[in-house]
Amino acid sequence: MFKLYVIKEYQRLKEIESNQYGLEWNVKRILSKANYQIHTDAVKKYIVPKSGYTQAKEWLAYADEADLLNLVLFRCTAKQWRDLNPERVLNNENIRDMASINELAVLSSLENLNSILIKNGLGKRDRFKILNETAKEQLVNLNKADLLKSIKKENSSIYVDAVEQIKKKIN
């Protein structure tokens, strides 16, 4: 009976562990997409027409704005990251795949803020300064809190913080 209990607990813990990583991946995907459309719409409406890029080179305006956000948050452009991480590039990973949930939450916020700054006609240098200050402040605040602990799985009996549940069952 004891062996069966140990095996069942092991299986349950493995399920919790795999769900935890699946949950984290889903949260990261949602955060990555949250304000992306708002940001790209602002680029399309306010930057592309002024950029002078041909329709074939229009993507450069979007890449330039994405790199502005990458520089603010990660301190490097996507290309610089790829050059430094060729093995990850081979695995189809990018700079944002390596970001923490807190960094992705800040990135989503920065995309929204940048779209507002673009709409208001601020230049790239001024936007960088405002975005940089905002990113620092938000990261400090988010890093003080552990957001993963507050996220519950769809199955209400499985939580990210499985250790606490196990401790309760044992005691």
Image (cartoon, rainbow, N blue to C red):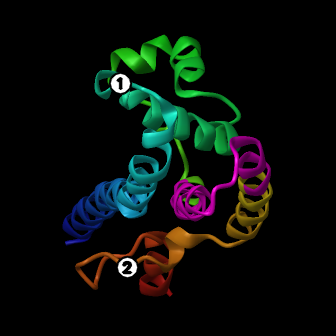
Q: Quadrant of the N terminus?
A: bottom left
**Circle 1 — which element?**
loop
Give residue 98's position: percent from left, percent from top.
50, 38
Q: Amino acid at mark 2?
A: Lys
- In terms of image quadrants, where is residue 42? bottom left
Q: Would you place residue 20 above or below residue 44 in this image?
A: below
Q: Would you place residue 163 above or below residue 107 in this image?
A: below
**Circle 2 — which element?**
loop
Which of the marked residues, 2 or 1, is nearer the chain's N terminus?
Answer: 1
The residues colored magenta run: 104-130
Residue at (69%, 42%) from the top-left corner? 124
> Which residue is label 1 attached to?
54
Left/right of residue 69 with respect to residue 143 in the rendered view = left
Give residue 61's position: percent from left, percent from top.
47, 34
- Please tell me whether residue 7 belongs to the stretch shown in magenta: no
Q: Would you place residue 139 above or below residue 125 in this image?
A: below
Our reading of the magenta stretch's main secondary structure is helix
> Which residue is label 2 attached to?
152
Res. 31 visible in picture: no
- Please tell me whether residue 122 belongs to the stretch shown in magenta: yes
Residue at (71%, 65%) from the top-left corner? 138
Residue at (80%, 57%) from the top-left corner? 133
Give residue 33's position: percent from left, percent from top.
36, 57
Left/right of residue 136 with respect to residue 112 in the rendered view = right
Q: Amino acid at mark 1?
A: Thr
